[in-house]
Image: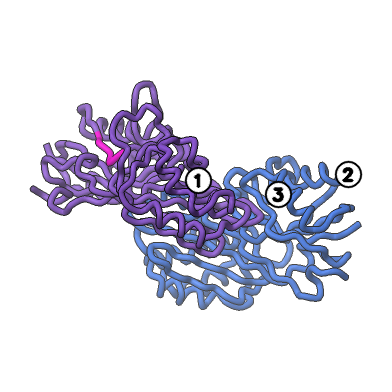
Chain colours: A purple, B blue
Amino acid sequence: MQNYHAILCYDGTKYNGWQKQGNTSNTIQEKLEQILTEIAQTPTEIFGSGRTDAGTHAKGQNANFHMNFSGTPKQLMTEINSRLPEDIGVLSLTEAAPRFHARLHAQAKRYVYNIWTGDMPPVFWRKYSFWCKEMPDISRMRQAAAQIIGTHDFKSFCANKRMKKSTVRTITEIQIEQKENRIVLSFTGNGFLYQMVRILTGTLIEIGEGKRSTEDIPSIFSAQDRACAGFTAPAKGLFLDEVFYDRAEGSGKA
Amino acid sequence: MQNYHAILCYDGTKYNGWQKQGNTSNTIQEKLEQILTEIAQTPTEIFGSGRTDAGTHAKGQNANFHMNFSGTPKQLMTEINSRLPEDIGVLSLTEAAPRFHARLHAQAKRYVYNIWTGDMPPVFWRKYSFWCKEMPDISRMRQAAAQIIGTHDFKSFCANKRMKKSTVRTITEIQIEQKENRIVLSFTGNGFLYQMVRILTGTLIEIGEGKRSTEDIPSIFSAQDRACAGFTAPAKGLFLDEVFYDRAEGSGKA
């Protein structure tokens, strides 16, 4: 069977996140598997690069699946898109090397978090951003972000209390850009713990609002306690923006 | 009582348009009057610059209302916004001259229509744009638009068959801009008939797709028959963008 590499976008508002697990229904993975199974007429699984939380969006989720399909990847993509609801879409579909796996071969990811500021909450961006009435101090947020970059134990920024595996991760870049009344934060790293981007964002907002010192980051890291970090920014402001693969492992025929 | 001039934005997706009329319920006007009446504790009407269709959005609807309110306009705006649902917002609120009327004194309006092109329908813009798979020919659309500018009888572009009043209007500007895979059409004029912008847009799309000649416009005008013009582009792509007032008649204390 051919292995396919798909890049997907979705509006996560109405879904319980990417991944089906236990009794969780109404996930994006489930929706896609249902459609792939209809097309292949045999049970077909799809493997995402990682989970996204309930309510979180994606502009570049990556996934792979195996299928026998007689047409071209372009035809398969059209077939899938014609069956998908309007809040999920396949952006690209290519033939992948037989052993390519969207999660195991992912080398890095970029997440983007959108903040909207101003007296009035955003009418047209209400499902895709978090509203802060007052503009936080961007230079304070950047000072704090510089202390997050690098390899650290992110246990204090992980919402999973029973996490038994390593909580060490590397963040290679954090960009904080002001675009008119919006703030766009982007986080690039080799992996992210459960709700890590949302807790990092919440902590940076509290620093930008002057509720915390820009010098708080090292002590939050050393505490290894979720309670020492900031609030969890809402899922609706978060987008999985891009997943990075080594070219040799990535898509393209073997 | 003080006359107030409000500039409003709304996501029209869930509403039956701006204006309450007869048995039409769930309108934006109705929602606002309900809130203004609660604040004033006396029945309060609001007058819009004009109707918007069911499903059409606004980034700059204008309206006026009279009220006794003890605080500043800023405080009143905050009070209204705190009671509004998340798909309606007051962008500005100022004291207006006693006789200022948002409809009677409107001198011109600008509407914007958003088209999204590409293989995949827009996931995040699905409620705010019309999807054309193939990019229409912008230069053909601009050639046709040039023939629409000016003062004409727009009867062929009016969906109201029983229109008894004059159907002559003046369009002063049509801009057609391509922004990556989007096309943004903006129409500025002294007044617009029922569904006129949507029928103009549908006609321009058909010309851009090569289904009609760029020379069709004069014959559509002279036919004075709705059936001769193009399709009615869906309401969801349309935004009332701005309403223009003479400064002397507009807001500001008398």
Return the residue found at the far left.
A254
Residue A139 place in picture, x, y as percent:
50, 62
Q: CA distance from mark 1 to mark 2?
A: 43 Å
Say left or right for A145 vs B151. left
Q: CA distance from mark 1 to mark 3?
A: 25 Å
Q: Is residue A49 magenta?
A: yes
Q: If the image is split into quadrants, where does the N terminus of chain A sit?
A: top left
Residue B162 place in picture, x, y as percent:
68, 56
| Residue A159 position by quadrant | top left
Residue A102 place in picture, x, y as percent:
23, 42
Instruction: Depth check: give the residue in front, A69 or B154.
Output: A69
Q: Is residue A185 magenta?
A: no
Which amino acid, mark 3?
Asn
What segment is highlighted magenta in the picture? A46-50
Instruction: Depth check: give the residue in front, B108 or A178.
Output: A178
Q: Residues within 10 Å of mark 2 (few under 14, many from 20)?
A: few
Mark 1 or 2: the one toward you: 1
Q: CA distance from mark 3 to mark 2?
A: 19 Å
Q: Residues within 10 Å of mark 1 (few under 14, many from 20)?
A: some
Q: Which label sits on residue A202? A: 1
Q: Dot 1 lies on which element? A: helix
Say left or right for B8 vs B141. right
Q: Which label sits on residue B81? A: 3
Which amino acid, mark 2?
Thr
Kindly identify which residue carries mark 2: B42
Q: Residue at x 74, y 68 (%)?
A: B106
Residue B72 place in picture, x, y as percent:
82, 58
Mark 3 or 2: the one toward you: 3
